[in-house]
Image (cartoon, rainbow, N blue to C red):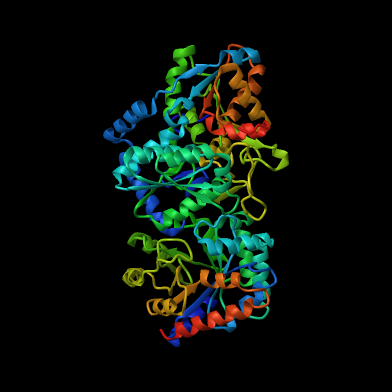
Amino acid sequence: MQSKQMYNYPDSTGHFGQFGGTYMAETLIPAVEELSREYLRYRDDPEFKAEFAYELKHYVGRPSPVYHAKRLSESLGGAQIYLKREDLNHTGAHKINNAIGQALLAKRMGKKRVIAETGAGMHGVATATVAARFGMECIVYMGAEDIQRQAANVFRMKLLGATVVPVESGSRTLKDACNEAIRDWVTNVESTFYIFGTAAGPHPYPMMVRDFQCVIGNEAKVQMPEMIGRQPDAVIACVGGGSNAIGLFYPYIEEKNVQIIGVEAGGHGIASGKHAAPLTANAKVGVLHGNKVYLIQDENGQIIETHSISAGLDYPGVGPEHCLLKDMGRAQYVAINDDEALAAFDALCRFEGIIPALESSHAIAHAIKIAPTMSKDKALLVNLSGRGDKDMNTVATLKGITL
Amino acid sequence: MSRIQATFDKLKQQQRKALIPFITAGDPSLQLTVPLMHGLVEAGADVLELGVPFSDPMADGPTIQRASERALKHGMSLRGVLAMVAEFRTQDATTPVVLMGYGNPIEAMGWEVFAKRCAEVGVDGVLTVDFPPEESHDAFEHLQAHGIDPIFLLAPTTNDARIQQVAKLARGYVYYVSLKGVTGAGNLDLSAIEQKLPQLRKHIKLPIGVGFGIRDAATALAVAKLCDGVVVGSRIVQEIEDSTEQSVVGNVSKLVKELRLAVDKA
């Protein structure tokens, strides 16, 4: 097992072992180099850190509580399930942690225009929110398919003053929104800060997003001993690009007794080929959106359209640090299918009075699956990364109800 | 001597500038790519850039995005592109062919296999848009081993240190991206190119081709005056999109002849 001294990624060139890197067109290389320089300059700057902490406390509402899901745990008859309540953050998900961090950096770099890609719309809402908060122009790229699925979030972004640009190319989902945001960035590289939503993309994004999201795991490491006198036996989070997961996992990497489990979107099942689970499905290594990662692709290296009930997990790649943690054996990655996620969604609603995001429902579903196999004195900490208000239409449609 | 070097040497002797058209392999159809390549050469092309379609062409504007989508719909693959170059070479042993695209299809094939196949079928250069010099070590080791020229991009945002880095690695020619934007963008700024080129020439001893945003004879001529070669992509791909299968070779030839005349006035 790795000691704290040994686990030190990424390296100075942005690589997590063979993963990560800076695979970008030349026009943008100077921009990501500048971003690296500026981020490293402010990362340990006391004033920057203080401002970030202030915003997290007073604007986001942190720390987010850890909640013991007692009735759900009792119904399962096994391990106790605890929820890290990122759904209680301002804007309803963990995405705001990172959006605030990057907006503070953008402000220091003198960038007045921010762009973002979004899948489920939570990162788009978070970016639109911080842009309003700091007085910046905001453009959000969103797949036309996702705009259909997440109409409420589109309206929310517009209320916050953002321009939402529908992306009609490719599969019209998150990966295509990324492509279009990159095209905007290459065109407006000097005026624009790209607030990237997940712990992937070219260096320094995977590191920077992880650092901003680590507040999740850092809080949990204090809260769990307060609640149960020790750390949990396992930490569990859903993984699309993997920002909420790495935020919870990273502070636990050296805690050897804590199992780390990432839950990917199994869609209609790995065997069906209609999923968004590159790690679980043993996808090949490839290069997309600026980094080398495990990537769902065909034998010719073309990216295959993914499927998930949850727009936020519907992405063919995954962050480079998750790829490394898988290869090191430090984290385990599993997949939860659409129907299992929906059942978990219902269970949390009925047993705990909490409506989870469909993304987070994947992590809950895995806890529901393994809790009964464990004794009652075991503890599972699940990252409840977002709330489910945005998913009302999707869930209603799946239940055959018209709202 | 490589075909690319021989071509640029000859052009230099003739005091002419290179015309480098780009088409996407497999667009408008699998059958028409090789006839189009020959048509481009007959109309006056010096070097051919053959686009390898990719599902996520992040550096391309809508025109080349659509061409990639059409080509992929026809089942175009990197293997297929290499077979097309082999077929082209049965009738043309001299015109350099550069494959241009994104890294992942090559990663999937493996750089070693790819480089070997390039040499076998007669590919002369490879331009991988999303593989900057810092991520290219393994890739280009294999290309070099098989005598394939790695073609690098430089951009308006590229600083002196990076120009020097590219100068060390680049072979064949260097492709200067004339504007901040995607292929086919409309914001070409001639005075900015004119200002940037001396900075490039200070370190780059290879011929410099300029592309992105060149859309007609007038812009081709203006750019040709400043550099060693003019790359025209989106405009040609647009012509392909606007043509029928019957008219496409003729229409593209006519367009390239106009561009040739313009470039030769430089």
- Answer with the quarter of the image where residue B224 lies: bottom left
- From the viewer's perspective, is B41 left or right of A250? right
Measuring from the top left, give residue A226's x and y in whole percent: 44, 13
Most foreground residue, A387 or A225:
A387
- From the viewer's perspective, is A372 left or right of A182? right
Most foreground residue, B182 or B194:
B182
Q: Is residue A40 visible?
A: no
Q: Is residue A327 above or below residue B26?
A: above
Quarter of the figure that contains the C terminus of chain A: top right
Q: Is residue A267 visible?
A: yes
Residue under the point 50% across and 17% down: A67
Q: Is residue B58 above or below residue A83?
A: below
Measuring from the top left, give residue B116's x and y in whole percent: 62, 64
Measuring from the top left, give residue B193's x and y in whole percent: 36, 70
- Answer with the quarter of the image where residue A126 lies: top left
Looking at the image, the residue that sits furthest to the bottom is B14
Most foreground residue, A153 or B86:
A153
Residue under the point 57% across and 33% down: A391
Q: How many marks?
A: 0
Looking at the image, the residue that sits furthest to the left is A47
Q: Is residue B207 above or below residue A88?
A: below
Measuring from the top left, give residue B119's x and y in whole percent: 61, 69
Looking at the image, the residue that sits furthest to the right is A271
